[in-house]
Image (cartoon, helix red, strand yellow):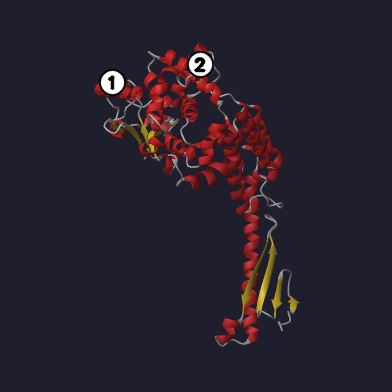
Amino acid sequence: MANKITVKGNKEGICWRDDRKAWEVRYTSDVTGKRASKYFGVKKLVKAGWSMADAKKAAKDEAEKWRKEAISKDVLAVKEAEQLTVDKLFYERLYPTLANKERNTVASYETRYRRNVHPVMGHMQIADVTGDECRKVLIRMDKDGYAAETMWRTYVVMYQLFRLAEDDGLLGSWGRSPVTASVRAICKDKAALDAKNAEDTRQMTPGELTALLAAAEGCCYYDEFLLVSLTGLRVGELCGLHWDDVDFDAGVIRVRRNYLYTAGAGGGWREGHLKSPSAKRDIPMCSAVRAMMQERYRHRHERKAAGSLFEGLVFLTSGGRPTVANNYNRKLEELRRTVGIDHLSIHSLRHAYATNCAALGVPVAILKALMGHRDIATTYNVYVHINVQEFTKQSAFGRYNADMKYTLLGENSPNDFSDKVA
């Protein structure tokens, strides 16, 4: 039979537990609203030769000391919370904890806070922030046309910020983070809407891409646009492409590097990790890509790298550095108006490559390897958005059709291609 519990009250919040032979301190924080309890036993003292009365008195003194310290911490926390704004919480508390994260992640946190969170609540005391302010941040972003992914990043910043405040007991008597499920629901609703819109979005047709590349001939970025359209490289992989990664003998481009650019003070170019282990891959070069790369190789010494970081890169500006993605996108914006197609970016050319491969009959498992996707479900979404009959009618990439089909599928069967992907 379990021991009978006898509780003898002795001052508020402190009681004697016969079953544990210990004093129990129960304390509910006025700041966080959380209840804490701690036991101060007498068994060790009795074993050491103390009398029970002396042991109980010493243990009770320790219990009272612990409770007074807890109350003092509460008082200090209240004073600190009264002076701590959301800006201070971010820059003085949360920002230093990001030191071990990737530079781009840190920049993303700072950008999302500065542009989206700060205007709504940066000046407020943290204890005064409610779910209304948090929802207002995301509702504003939705009205301003931000993508669901960007809104989610902002939600994560707010969540981490107020979880830190909650853990440190800085949120007043309520003591709970204002970033609740109703705030998160705004991101979920936006993501569902973006997904539906993506299903309704018409992909760029091969005829449009052929017209775009024709319009781009002669512009300074034509080679890059052609390469991404016929290999599906990500922009960071394009910027980091090194001549050592171009194997003319094997007829493949080996994706091994990812160059990242961070704007602002302390930013610039750096070599980062590939997006995932699956991004490390070999992509076959069709004859159009091979001819373009060989021509560039012959003229590779005409542009000098601006530093050791850029030595050996395939694509350099006149200043000896890679091209920032926004410059590619600005040029594409000019070209798409000429051709008369919807808004696009250099990443749209990567999607066009995937769509064309799907229309040509490249098996989804092979296409996953070509694209460097970690999850085959991402690749499978390509098939959801294409109209195979439309693509076939337009002779997929026009003059590049036979070239691509031979390179990717071989002369006879899609299975001939499986041994060409590393």
Q: How many marks?
A: 2
Check the picture and name the quadrant holding the C terminus: top left
- x then y, percent, for residue 170: 63, 50
Q: Is 413 left, or right, of 120 in this rendering?
A: left
Residue flagged by tag 2: what amino acid is it? Answer: Arg
Looking at the image, which is closer to me, 115 or 332?
332
Q: Quadrant of residue 250?
A: top left
- x then y, percent, for residue 93: 54, 47
Nearer the N terminus, badge 1 or badge 2? 1
How dense is the environment of label 2, judged by Cα within 10 Å: few (below 14), some, or many (20 and up)?
A: many
- x then y, percent, for residue 129: 68, 42
How dense is the environment of label 1, judged by Cα within 10 Å: few (below 14), some, or many (20 and up)?
A: few
Q: Is 378 left, or right, of 53 in this rendering?
A: left
Q: Helix, strand or loop at disc 1?
A: helix
- x then y, percent, for residue 327: 44, 22
The residue identified by callout 2 is: 336
Is residue 256 something one can see in this rendering?
no
Q: Residue at x 39, y 33 (%)?
A: 237
Q: Residue at x 50, y 11 (%)?
A: 338
The residue identified by callout 1 is: 295
Q: Residue at x 65, y 39 (%)?
A: 188
How far apart marks 1 and 2 lie (CA) works out to 27 Å
